[in-house]
Each structure stands twice: as structure tokens, then as C-alpha cells.
Amino acid sequence: MSSDKTVASDGTKGHVVLGISSSIVATLVLISPILYTLVAYPDTFVLSWNEGRGGFLFAMAFIAAELVGLKYSLGRKRLLMAAGLAVLAISYFIALQYGLADYIRNAKDAYNVSLVDSWVWMWDFIVMALFVASSTVLLFGKKWYKIASAGTIYLAGSALILALDAFFPFDSLGPLQIIVPIYLQIDQTLINFIDAYVVNVGPQTLNNSAEPAIARGNLLVINGLHGPFALQVFWPSAGVHSMIIYTLVMLALLIKMDIPLARKMIYFVAGTFGTVAINLVRIVSLSLYALVVTTDVQEWEAFHSIAGEIMFLPWLGIYLGVVIYIENRKMRRLQTEAGSATASNQSNR
């Protein structure tokens, strides 16, 4: 444990509370509602973004990544107040099994909800986003967004996407649907290239065409080793939700960084292209799964439900880690150069 001291937000000093690092205590407080739901509702932790609470696990990872090891003194009073907020958040999840879940579900008619499941999960993420945001403001004050904002932004972004899915499902939200035909045209080109130059992915008898994949608008028809398979793709499946999450989390990181604006823009644009590439890899892998592995709808849906998260979130974590590593190296080099220059000036006096 570092011996450095930092003034706490309430004026006390030290990094230790009850013999434990205050940053670890803060982390445990912030993730305690997630830990409760993990124990109370383990079956709801599926990876698919709109089928359960799997996103809580990634939010927990973001919170821990920002807080564990943080050299910031936190007073006991503020930690206790944050713990009180955690109790309120946990109370919400307890109340779900005593009628609150039914009340939320039945409220769908009053708000003209189209997809009920997304509506129900949305409230979980709203509650967690409000809890984490209010707790970090309480713990770190006005500069909370420069210290620990990624978890809040990820939860709020997930709530936003679930809200869009609940109220504007399928292709009802035109602006977000625009990207779908572009992705499918690229997917068609890549699949046909793979079939022509890499490996045969199925019979050459699709609509009297030699191509195993044909894209028209938001429709993709493929014919592989297990027969024909048709896909109708809407904006959530095209990776729009991952682009929204990337944008929010990346902005949270860049806001915290004291680096030139031009370098921030380079990082953001590079990550945007990387996210687009990951989305294309996911769509192509879904096509290849139907072409080569199976056309059984249930099996394909099972793969589809986890493909996005198992590709996008590791990529996001790795990219953020690379950006932080590069900037830390630059900072250490500058500090070393500054120290060398200072030593040289002193020796010349």
C-alpha cells in the first residue's frame, strides 16, 4: 500500500478504512447491488444485452477497473452514506420478487411499450445507473466524472438502448436502421469472397446464383452446407447498441485524460473504426455459423444472443487498456525527461 496521502472529500486523511483500502471499500459498496442480484437471481445473468442482467457483470468490471488501487482518501461518513444508497438499490431488487416486477410489467400498456422484456430490464439498469452516479458524486464530489464515470455511463447507455428497443423495436426507428443494408452488403461480399477464394461454404444453388449469400435491404439469404437460411436484420443486431456503448465509454475515458484534443480525436476515430470492424466480424461469423454449422433456428439464436458481447466487450476493454498504456508511457517519458533536464540545470550552476 502506498504511503502517499490525499485529502479526503470530507477533510480526513489516509487511504485506509477499518484496515481496508478505502478504494476497495468504495468498490464493494458500488457493486454490492450487483452482487446481491447475482446471488438472488443467478438465472438472469445471460450475456445477451436485452435478455437479462449480464450487462451488470461488465458494469462491475468497469467500476472495479477505475476504483481498485485508486489513491484517493475517502471519509467514513461518505462511505456510510453511499452504503445507505446501496441498501436502497438492493431494496429495489428485493421488491421485484414481491410484486414490483409485475407492476412494472403491467405498466407497459400505459406507456405503449412494444417489447415488454426490454422495458422490464431497462428499469434495472436505470436504478443501477442512478445509484452508481449518485454514489460516485457523493464519494468524489464535482470531479466524479474524472475519477469513476465509466460504470455509470455504461449502465446509463445500456438503459438508453433498452428503452429504444422497448419503444422502437425492429425497424421502427429509421435513422438507426440506415446502417443495416450497408453492413449486409459488406457481409455478402465477404462471404462470397470466402466461398470463392478460401473455402467452400455450401452448395452453389441459391436462386440460380453461384453466390452463397445475397443481401437485399435488411434481408440476407444464404445457402450453405445445411441448406438455405434467411435473416431479417434490424438495428440492434447490426451493432448499433455496441457503437452507442463505445461512444459513451470512450468519451468518459477521454474526458478524464489531460491530453491534446487532436490526440483524443485520433483515439476516438481509431476506436470507432475498430468497433465497426468488430461488428462486421460478428455479422460474418453469424452468417458462417448458419452456412457451416447449423440452420436450426434455436441453436443459431443461442449463438446470436452471445456473439455480440463476447466479441465487442473484450475488444472495448483491450482498446481502452491500450490507450491508457500508451498515455502512461508518454507521461512517464515526459517526467523522466523533465527530471533529467532539472538535474542537468542544477549541475551546470
Image (spheres, rainbow, N blue to C red):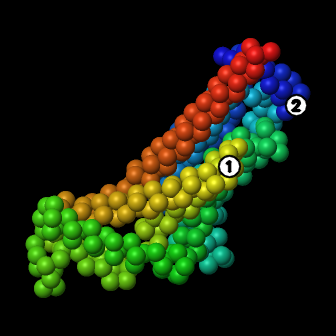
Q: Residues within 10 Å of mark 2 (few under 14, many from 20)?
A: some
Q: Is residue 236 left or right of residue 213?
A: right
Q: Quadrant of the C terminus?
A: top right
In the structure shown, which secondary structural element does the residue marked by tag 1 occupy? loop
In the image shown, does 296 or 90 lie closer to the viewer?
A: 296
**Residue 168: quarter of image:** bottom right
Residue marked by disc 1: 260
Give the alpha-carbon distance from disc 2 to disc 1, as whole Å.
32 Å
Residue 10 marker: 2
| Amino acid type, residue under disc 2 in the picture | Asp
In the image shown, does 325 or 60 lie closer to the viewer?
A: 325
Residue 140 marker: none
| Amino acid type, residue under disc 1 in the picture | Pro
Residue in the picture at 61% in, 51% down: 263
Residue 107 drawn at (x, y percent): 64, 70
Q: Note whether 334 is above or below 252 in the view shown.
A: above
Inspect this view and state whether residue 16 appears.
Answer: no
Residue 342 drawn at (x, y percent): 74, 22
How many discs appear?
2
Inspect this view and state whether residue 58 appears.
Answer: yes
Residue in the picture at 82% in, 41% down: 141
In the image shown, does 203 or 267 lie closer to the viewer?
A: 267
In the structure shown, which secondary structural element does the residue marked by tag 2 occupy? loop
Residue 96 drawn at (x, y percent): 62, 53
Residue 260 drawn at (x, y percent): 68, 49
In the image shown, does 241 or 87 lie closer to the viewer?
A: 241
Q: Note whether 226 is above or below 254 in the view shown.
A: below
Q: Residues within 10 Å of mark 1 (few under 14, many from 20)?
A: few
**Residue 231: quarter of image:** bottom left
